[in-house]
Image (cartoon, rainbow, N blue to C red):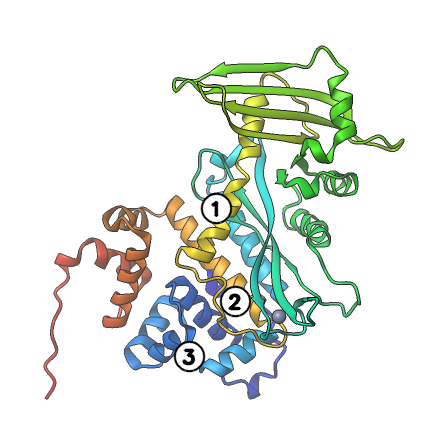
């Protein structure tokens, strides 16, 4: 499936002059991310050996394995937006096979958390598209970041990324790109990709100002943005003038008290053109009355005793984009901050996207693939499992990815023959 997506990407190069197809380049780099190999150079070097070349052919459909420098040179030229249809295709497949139904937070409404994250930071390595910051001593720090979105659900561990928006300098303008501008482009592209899908977008406190809320509502999505009382003093004072603020409390089995309070149709700020929003807050205290958690949000969804608990769960779910997505990409085997190569134009961002695609594949496996789930169960640690997969492909030629997993699960049924060499 991924193969046909890579083949579908337009290749502007003159074919007679090309040693390697874009498909083989994208797939070779993807294979490295897929197997969570920390060294692209080492992975490629191994793959050039005959046995590994066979695995790259059988598992990933790569005909000609590009050499390292060519792989990076070609990846540097591929516009990152050409990979967007792949994220859309995966999403549509999950939807068609009813896997997204379990993710609906309300009927036909998916919870999509968004957040910015930096994946490159250096004083030396940089490209045309790097963000840059000049320090007092004249040093310059270069960086790349993304505005990432992912579909999630309070009861689900797996998060499903959508095509991110790069936060980078592309148009040659003096003013640098920023998270806020990227957030506006992000929602426009998301709705273009999924025009009929309902979304409840969960964002942080930087999002809960009028221009951003209006942009999102005009795009046709619902919003649920953190609203810190300190950032919204007028709104908070306005709320406190009411004596009838709806609330709901309960104490759970562990003695924790859950306090919810909300107010619909209130002005976001004190200016004449203020939009009306619905505000709610949640405070969790332990049996001794100590506050364990507190947060507050604004939304366009009408709040009531019927949905306040679910809305709070939706708002609290936002941590998963940091923990289950960014943290996993940075620290749990994917090496997203690792410098696989930076390039002059698109290499850095394409490496991020291919890593994100590998993560997306694995999340889909966890959700839908019985053999993968069995491997996870058998080998317990994810890190150990991928080490095992890497070992298998470095020693044996495998016909398919299914065979790699089957080998882990039913090793004893495989007759491993030592070949005597003369
Ligand atoms: Zn750069």
Please, what secondary structure does the residue beneath circle 3 have?
loop
Position of residue 217 measured from the top left corner of the image (x, y, whole percent): 74, 38
Residue that numbered label 2 is attached to: 351
Q: Is residue 224 visible?
A: no
Q: Is residue 336 left or right of residue 395?
A: right
Mark closer to the chain start, 1 or 2 = 1
Residue at 43% x, 41% y is 157
Task: For ligand 1, tell me if the residue under mark 2 lies within 8 Å.
Answer: no
Residue at 27% x, 51% y is 375
Image quadrant in which you'd find residue 65:
bottom left
Against 224, residue 38 (above or below) is below
The mark lying in front, picked from 1 and 2, is: 1
Position of residue 129 measured from the top left corner of the image (x, y, whole percent): 67, 69
Residue that numbered label 1 is attached to: 323
Position of residue 374 measured from the top left corner of the image (x, y, whole percent): 27, 47
Q: Nearer the viewer, residue 249 or 304?
A: 249
Against 89, residue 64 (above or below) is below
The mark lying in front, picked from 3 and 2, is: 2
Image quadrant in which you'd find residue 144:
bottom right
Quadrant (top left/top right/bottom left/bottom right) for the C terminus: bottom left
Residue at 26% x, 61% y is 388
Q: Nearer the viewer, residue 247 or 150?
A: 247
Q: Is residue 289 visible?
A: yes
Determine crowd level at label 3: few under 14, some 14-19, many 20+ residues with C-alpha closer than 10 A: many
**Number of the label disc, if any, that sits on residue 65:** 3
Q: Is residue 45 left or right of residue 219?
A: left
Image quadrant in which you'd find residue 349:
bottom right
Q: Are marks 1 and 2 in contact (CB under 8 Å)?
A: no
């Amino acid at each position: 499936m991924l193969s046909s997506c890579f083949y579908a990407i337009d290749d502007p190069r003159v074919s007679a002059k090309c040693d390697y197809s874009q498909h083989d380049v994208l797939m070779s780099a993807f294979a490295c991310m897929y197997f969570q190999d920390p060294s692209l150079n080492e992975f490629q070097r191994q793959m050039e050996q005959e046995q590994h070349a066979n695995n790259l052919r059988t598992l990933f459909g790569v005909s000609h394995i590009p050499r390292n420098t060519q792989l990076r040179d070609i990846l540097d030229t591929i516009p990152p937006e050409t990979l967007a249809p792949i994220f859309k295709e995966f999403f549509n497949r999950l939807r068609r096979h009813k896997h997204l139904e379990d993710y609906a937070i309300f009927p036909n409404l998916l919870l999509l958390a968004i957040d910015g994250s930096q994946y490159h930071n250096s004083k030396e390595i940089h490209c045309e598209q790097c963000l840059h910051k000049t320090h007092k001593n004249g040093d310059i720090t270069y960086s790349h970041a993304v505005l990432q979105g992912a579909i999630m659900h309070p009861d689900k561990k797996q998060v499903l990324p959508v095509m991110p928006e790069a936060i980078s300098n592309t148009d040659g303008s003096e003013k640098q790109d920023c998270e806020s501008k990227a957030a506006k482009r992000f929602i426009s592209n998301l709705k273009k990709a999924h025009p009929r899908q309902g979304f409840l977008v969960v964002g942080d406190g930087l999002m809960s100002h009028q221009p951003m809320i209006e942009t999102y509502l005009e795009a046709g999505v619902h919003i649920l943005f953190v609203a810190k009382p300190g950032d919204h003093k007028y709104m908070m004072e306005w709320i406190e003038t009411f004596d009838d603020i709806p609330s709901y409390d309960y104490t759970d089995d562990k003695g924790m008290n859950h306090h919810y309070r909300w107010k619909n149709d209130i002005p976001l700020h004190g200016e004449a053109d203020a939009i009306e929003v619905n505000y709610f807050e949640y405070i969790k205290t332990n049996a001794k009355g100590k506050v364990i958690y507190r947060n507050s949000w604004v939304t366009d969804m009408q709040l009531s005793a019927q949905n306040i608990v679910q809305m709070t769960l939706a708002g609290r779910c936002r941590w998963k984009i940091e923990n289950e997505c960014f943290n996993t990409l940075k620290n749990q085997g994917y090496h997203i901050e690792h410098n696989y190569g930076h390039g002059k134009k698109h290499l850095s961002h394409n490496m991020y996207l291919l890593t994100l695609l590998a993560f997306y594949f694995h999340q889909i496996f966890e959700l839908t693939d019985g053999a993968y789930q069995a491997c996870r169960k058998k080998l317990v640690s994810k890190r150990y499992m991928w080490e095992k997969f890497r070992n298998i492909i470095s020693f044996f030629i495998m016909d398919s990815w299914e065979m790699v997993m089957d080998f882990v699960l039913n090793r004893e049924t495989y007759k491993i023959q030592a070949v005597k060499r003369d």
